[in-house]
Image: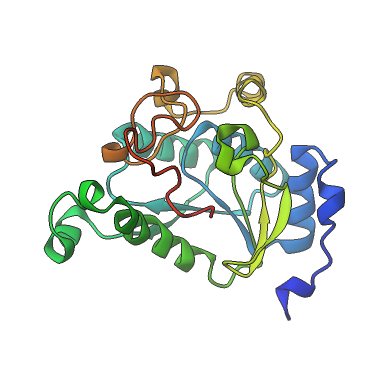
Amino acid sequence: MDVRSLTMPVEEAEVLSAEQVVELVLERLHPRVALACSFQKEESVLLDMLLEREPGARVFALDTHVLFPETYATWRTVEQRYGIEVEVFQGPSLGRQAATHGDALWERDPELCCAIRKVAPLGRALAGLDGWISGIRRDQSPTRAETPKLAWDERHELWKACPLAGWTDDDVWAYVRERDVPVNPLHERGYASIGCTHCTRPGDGRDGRWAGSSKTECGLHV
């Protein structure tokens, strides 16, 4: 079946709540839909929403092998809290990457580094799915300002849902407090956005990602 032929109420989704968008994609696409989890606070919220409604929902993570220790700890906490096993898709280890491309590729060619560690594994993660769920929000950066809650992902040829697209940072924290969901402790230390150790610094919005360079996205959402 052509996944694009599935009837999806794209325009109607814009007036739905985040919870309703999650319910919609589960109703139409489960079990061939998965949450892409980077263990930031937005994914903590979506994990809680998703697994409350469908305990067997799929969740995957991209292990770049250079995530923060706090991120790996949050990963373990999430699995224990919800009784799940997050599917893992990996980029090369530091040793294998250095052997092929030289040391500190993230400094010399950050675009290639992201392509190897994140974009390629994402392609493998999405293979065979009809849709994926992401935690990106419109107010995170200008490049995300037009993010729809539901849309056809031309690049990967499947549906993409961003249930929190219209949420603010305050909305996310309100849900976290209300539901007492586990969050990455780096958020409390000034990291609004959390990626790999070499390319992430404290900062508002996405200011701490690739600080000092013109790079704003890793390539997963463009």
Left or right of residue 89, residue 146 in this image:
right
Residue 150, given in percent of the width and then of the height, sits at 73, 52
Residue 120, given in percent of the width and then of the height, sits at 40, 64
Above or below: residue 54 compared with residue 184: below
What is the residue that sits farthest to the front in this orientation?
A: 214
Above or below: residue 187 compared with residue 68: above
Left or right of residue 105, residue 34 in this image:
right
Query: How many marks are shown on the rendered structure?
Result: 0
Above or below: residue 65 compared with residue 1: above
Residue 40, given in percent of the width and then of the height, sits at 49, 35
Q: How is the image coloured?
A: rainbow
Above or below: residue 17 compared with residue 65: above
- Of 25 and 123, the residue lying toward us: 123
- Of 127 and 13, the residue lying toward us: 13
Residue at horizontal 39%, vertical 56%?
118
Left or right of residue 13, residue 66 in this image:
left
Quarter of the image for the N terminus: give it.
Answer: bottom right
Residue at horizontal 19%, vertical 53%?
94
Residue at horizontal 85%, vertical 52%?
11
Residue 19, given in percent of the width and then of the height, sits at 76, 39
